[in-house]
Amino acid sequence: MIVCAGESEQFDFAMPVGIGLIDAAINLTKICLEQNPKEICFVGSAGSYGDHQIFDIIETECACNVENSFLQGKSYSPIEADVSHETSACRVMVNSSNYITTEESLGQAYLEKNIHLENMEFYAIMKVAKAFGIPAKGILVVTNYCNENAHRDFMNHHKEAMERLTRYIESTLI
C-alpha cells in the first residue's frame, strides 16, 4: 500500500493519511485496522540538513522524532526516539516533527547525530507500521534545505519535485 500526506502532496496511486505526526498516525491506524495492508510505502517531500541535494530521491526505512530543543540540551524524552525496519541497516535517518527546522546550525547538529532529512509524517508512519508488524519504508524527494529559506525553497521546488517523485514511483513500484 502506498500512502502520502495529502493536500499538496497527493498522488493518484497513494492514499492520503494527513499532514503531521498526529493526523498521519490516526489515519494510518484506521487504514491498518480496516484494510490490513501487507506492506506500507510512504511517499512525499523532505528537507535536507545538508548531505542531500534538491531533487534527490531517497528510499529509507529509518525514522526518528528528535526536537530542536533536544539538540540544544533543553529537553529530554522518555519515549523511543527512533524506529526502523528490523532487517535494514540505516543509511538515511529521517527526522519528523510538526515543525520545520529553519536554523542552519541545527541542521548541522542533526547531521552530527547521523540524521539526514526532515519530513513531518514519516516517524508516525513507521511507528504505526511497527505496531501492526507491517514492513514499511519511505521514498522521499528533497525540496529544500533546512535553513532560513526552507519554506520559500519548498514552494519553489515543490511542483517539479512531485513530478520527479511521481515518475520515480511509477517506474519502480507501479
Image (cartoon, rainbow, N blue to C red):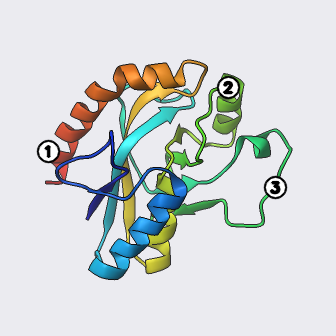
Q: Secondary structure at mark 3?
A: loop
Left or right: where does residue 130 sit relative to residue 45? right
Mark 1 burial class by Cα count in 10 Å: few <14, some 14-19, many 20+: few
Q: Residue at x 41, y 32 (%)?
A: 142
Q: Residue at x 61, y 19 (%)?
A: 148
Number of residue marks: 3
List the residue tagged with mark 3.
Answer: 76
State the CA–CA distance, disc 1 to disc 2: 35 Å
- Which of the two discs, 1 and 2, labels the residue nearer the N terminus? 2
List the residue tagged with mark 1.
Answer: 171
List the residue tagged with mark 2.
Answer: 103
Q: Are marks 3 and 2 in contact (CB under 8 Å)?
A: no
Quadrant in the rendering for residue 36: bottom left
Q: Could you tell me the amino acid type at mark 2?
A: Glu
Q: Quarter holding the N terminus?
A: bottom left
Q: Pinpoint residue 86: horizontal percent, then vertical percent.
A: 49, 69
Q: Secondary structure at mark 2?
A: loop
Q: Considering only vertical position in the picture, is 115 above or below 123?
A: above
Mark 2 burial class by Cα count in 10 Å: few <14, some 14-19, many 20+: some
Quadrant in the rendering for residue 42: bottom left
Left or right: where does residue 159 sit relative to residue 144? left
* The one of 28 and 105 positioned closer to us in this rendering: 28
Can residue 89 be seen here? Answer: no
State the CA–CA distance, disc 1 to disc 3: 42 Å
Q: Considering only vertical position in the picture, is 155 above or below 29?
A: above
Q: Pinpoint residue 167: horizontal percent, then vertical percent.
A: 17, 38
Q: Foreground mark, 1 or 2? A: 2
- Which of the two discs, 1 and 3, labels the residue nearer the N terminus? 3
Q: Foreground mark, 1 or 3? A: 3
Name the residue furthest right. Answer: 74
Left or right: where does residue 77 sit relative to residue 13? right
